[in-house]
Image (cartoon, rainbow, N blue to C red):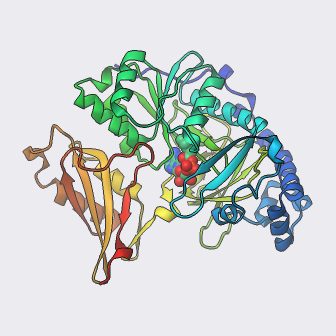
């Protein structure tokens, strides 16, 4: 049976989503000028950074002029920890979120009541783009707490008028039980945790294709087209991509439209995107791959000017909406593996591994140093039905060849038993780099 057509009616879209490019640019410029002026007036860090760069908010006369303004990095957030980039007094704040960060202090972000309203409206817009409607039930398995995923999706779903089931991550057995008993239409979750939920369906002997679910809204970590195909087939649902980051807001900065599934439309009325060359910092033309840099256009508590996301993508013209699209994030520049001089992203390896029908999306990449040579070992779990059968014979060697042919790096591939790779409740840890731990 074909999956239901979930494309929203044009009447369900905000007028700006289908406005002309000129209208969008005019709105962006007006909002950008205001944001620069407020950041300069209210945040000492921005005033100092603008002055050091010899620019003043009034120098921004066109959208392209933004390129003269200094960029902001995660290090700037750390240096001003916890509240140094806030533009409003404490009493004007309504919420704080933070991302744990692998090293050192967390990155702290703040929201006014108005910021929370905009965020909810943009997540609601993202849910509509994914095929959601008022009245649908949404099972939210993103983690609640300081992470923006849980509360972000929650507020957006309520704003739209969905029935929210605030499950959060974890207790996978219960996730399956609640999906079976409550019959939700939508699930919001990281793609890797949805695979853990899929395992649990099978463990309980339940048919994942027989659920009430129509669409999964997946994000917070990189995933591939091959993973989309696997998830859509396994659950017989639509799987769409949602992007965001706490420094800029949280989930709902960009989202995929279910009718096209061709990358994520950036909600350009609230965020101005640029793509830069990560080495030189130069702004690149649309269509070229580089690092995504985002400027908030309406944020009150913590405006961000030219925030370097570290996420690698490219900008493409709009299709289902007037806003520009960004291609699925290939990975973060921090996660790029440099192996014997070749740059590799885990998502490229994933794309190759998942072409095999006998393998699952549970995989991990381990980097070690043998002598002075770096080595990459990939472990991937077999589908339970295939494990121990001749179907897998020679598959490891085939995959290693594919990786060598396609990406140009030598990797060893081991197909391992179902359940042997650590599951995450949120963002999966794909790469374990042990190269610093060894001497050779
Ligand atoms: O992960 C916000 C979020 C929650 C997005 C739920 C989508 C769904 P952070 O914890 O601050 O915020 O992490 C942000 O996660 O810079 C990307 O590297 C990565 N990321 C987020 N969405 C995607 C995606 C949330 N759809 C960082 N594809 C970002 C690839 C993503 N990477």
Q: Pinpoint residue 20: horizontal percent, then vertical percent.
A: 75, 37
For the point 84% across and 62% down, the residue is 44
In this rendered view, identify the residue nearer to me: 236 or 207: 207
Farthest residue to the front: give it.
91
Q: Left of 294 or right of it: where is 29?
A: right
In this picture, is 73 found above or below 321? below
Q: Quadrant of the C terminus?
A: bottom left
Relative image position of residue 359 (x, y in whole percent)? 24, 45
Q: Who is closer to the viewer here, 146 or 237? A: 146
The picture places residue 392, in percent across and down from the top left corner, at 13, 48
**Picture residue at 25% right of the left edge, 52% below the top:** 380
Q: Quadrant of residue 321?
A: top right
Q: Taking 346 as reference, is 356 above or below it?
A: above
**Does residue 383 appear in this view?**
yes
Q: Residue at x 24, y 27 (%)?
A: 204
* Residue 228 showing in the rendered view: no
| Of the pair 374 and 262, the residue shown nearer to us | 374
Furthest residue in direction right, as rendered? 58
Q: Quadrant of the N terminus?
A: top left
Q: Is residue 414 left or right of residue 439?
A: left
Residue 55: x and y in percent read 86, 67
As drawn, is 153 to the left or to the right of 86?
left
Closer to the camera in the image, 420 or 89? 89
From the viewer's perspective, is 117 left or right of 389?
A: right
């Amino acid at each position: 049976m074909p999956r239901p057509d979930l494309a929203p009616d044009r009447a369900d879209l905000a007028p700006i989503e289908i406005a002309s490019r000129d209208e969008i640019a005019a709105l962006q410029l007006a909002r950008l000028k205001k944001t620069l002026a407020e950041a300069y007036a209210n945040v000492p860090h921005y005033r100092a950074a603008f002055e050091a760069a010899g620019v003043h908010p009034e120098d921004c006369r066109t959208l392209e002029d933004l390129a003269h303004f200094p960029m902001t990095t995660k290090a700037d957030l750390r240096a001003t920890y916890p509240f140094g980039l806030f533009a409003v007094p404490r009493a004007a704040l309504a919420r704080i979120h933070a991302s744990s960060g692998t090293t050192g202090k967390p990155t702290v972000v703040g929201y006014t009541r108005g910021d929370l309203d905009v965020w909810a409206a943009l997540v609601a817009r993202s849910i509509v783009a994914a095929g959601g409607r008022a009245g649908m039930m949404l099972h939210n398995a993103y983690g609640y707490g300081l992470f923006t995923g849980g509360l972000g999706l929650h507020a957006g779903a309520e704003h739209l008028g969905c029935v929210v089931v605030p499950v959060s991550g974890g207790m996978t057995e219960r996730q399956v039980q609640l999906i079976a008993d409550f019959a939700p239409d939508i699930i919001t979750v990281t793609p890797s945790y949805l695979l853990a939920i899929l395992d649990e369906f099978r463990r309980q002997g339940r048919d994942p294709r027989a659920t009430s679910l129509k669409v999964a809204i997946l994000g917070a970590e990189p995933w591939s087209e091959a993973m989309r195909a696997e998830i859509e087939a396994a659950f017989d649902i639509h799987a769409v991509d949602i992007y965001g980051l706490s420094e800029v807001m949280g989930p709902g900065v960009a989202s995929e439209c279910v009718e096209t599934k061709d990358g994520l439309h950036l909600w350009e009325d609230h965020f101005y995107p640029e793509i830069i060359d990560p080495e030189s910092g130069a702004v690149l033309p649309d269509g070229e791959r580089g690092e995504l840099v985002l400027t908030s256009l309406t944020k009150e508590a913590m405006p961000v000017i030219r925030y370097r996301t570290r996420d690698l993508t490219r900008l493409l013209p709009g299709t289902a909406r007037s806003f520009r699209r960004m291609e699925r994030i290939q990975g973060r520049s921090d996660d790029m593996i440099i192996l014997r001089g070749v740059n590799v992203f885990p998502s490229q390896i994933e794309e190759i591994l998942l072409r095999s029908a006998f393998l699952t999306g549970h995989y991990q990449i381990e980097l070690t140093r043998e002598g002075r040579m770096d080595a990459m070992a990939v472990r991937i779990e077999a589908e339970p039905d295939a494990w121990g059968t001749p179907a897998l014979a020679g598959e490891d060697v085939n995959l290693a060849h594919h990786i060598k042919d396609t990406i140009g790096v030598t990797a060893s591939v081991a197909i391992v038993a179902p359940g042997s790779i650590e599951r995450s409740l949120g963002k999966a840890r794909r790469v374990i780099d042990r190269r610093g731990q060894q001497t050779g």
